[in-house]
Amino acid sequence: MTFDSNAFLIIFTGALIAISCGFLGVFLLLRKMSMTGDAISHAVLPGIVIGFFVSGSQRSLEVILGAGLLGILSTLMIDALRKKAKVQLDASIGITFTLLFAIGIILINLFAYKVDLDQECVLYGEIAYLPIDLWITSSGLNLGPRITWLAGVNFFLILGFTYFLFKELSITSFDEQFSSAIGIPSKGINLALMSMVSYTTVSSFESVGAILVVALLVVPPSTAYLWTKSLIPLLRLTATLGILIAILGYYLAYWIDSSIAGMMVAVAGAFFFGSALIKGNWPLGLRGTSKSSPAFDS
């Protein structure tokens, strides 16, 4: 079998995105806030539209900044509804993302005649187009696929974020009150985490789409959690699953001539349900998830 550079780039980029989303998803899972990623992925739409309206480009810094600010705003809204208005977490998430997403749709319709932006370009993506979206410098130097560079930068940012704030992320994920008692700014760490989720969502739009990013934020960490409750093995297994999802997703999509991004998520779902069948005494329930609680041991 000959080496296919395009296949390698697609698989490599898909793995970077899956690992990046998975690392953030682990901490969202431990905080019981997995669907916050879904809320943020929809809530950033107004920021994207405003940023695109200002800059006229989907690839501009204004789009990323706008999405990041809306991601932080959605986090603050969810937290305020939960703590101040005493609304349950799932309800506060639903209220926040539907409201902000609706505002984004209204802005798209209002500015549709001024900017070339529609819902599909924001919500869907196809990683198969990656090899033809090249980053060419002003001097004519071809640096390769732009999305691969974007995914690589995002991967190292999240790796550094996880490494340097590992203790803070761990403690605030397991016991927010204890972290505040020992001087760790839990609200600041939470905002930093949600900002990274916002950035990751936006940077992955054009490759797998906002809707599919949600699956990569939730499914691989949830699958790994069925097998281990220890934090470091949980991160390692999530990363391994991300790589396998990218490889199997690509080749299965190639085999049946289907969407690569969609197949990657389908593979992720197959991993989860397979793990649930093995570990959860199906159909009596996922008992394995309640036998022990997360621990700091590795």
Image (cartoon, rainbow, N blue to C red):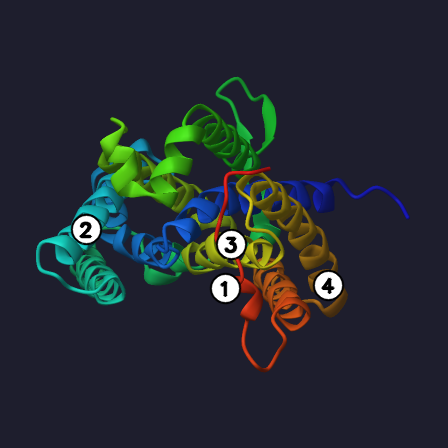
Sequence order check: which comes first, mark 2 or mark 1? 2
> Please, what secondary structure does the residue beneath circle 4 have?
helix
Percent of width and height locating residue 15: 62, 44
Q: Residue at x 48, y 53 (%)?
A: 293
Which residue is labeled 3 in the image?
216
| Residue in the foreground of this view, choosing between 165 and 115 | 165
Q: Are marks 4 and 3 in contact (CB under 8 Å)?
A: no
Three-letter code, disc 2: Asp
Q: Are marks 2 and 1 in contact (CB under 8 Å)?
A: no
Percent of width and height locating residue 207: 51, 49
**Label at residue 290:** 1
Sequence order check: which comes first, mark 3 or mark 1? 3
Which residue is labeled 4 in the image?
252
Sequence order check: which comes first, mark 1 or mark 4? 4
Kindly give the residue lying farthest to the bottom in the view shown: 283
**Label at residue 79:** 2
Q: CA distance from mark 2 to mark 3?
A: 23 Å
Percent of width and height locating residue 16: 58, 40
Q: CA distance from mark 2 to mark 1?
A: 26 Å
Q: Are marks 1 and 4 in contact (CB under 8 Å)?
A: no
Percent of width and height locating residue 115: 25, 50
Q: Quadrant of residue 251?
A: bottom right
Three-letter code, disc 1: Ser
Q: CA distance from mark 4 to mark 2?
A: 41 Å
Q: Quadrant of residue 142?
A: top right
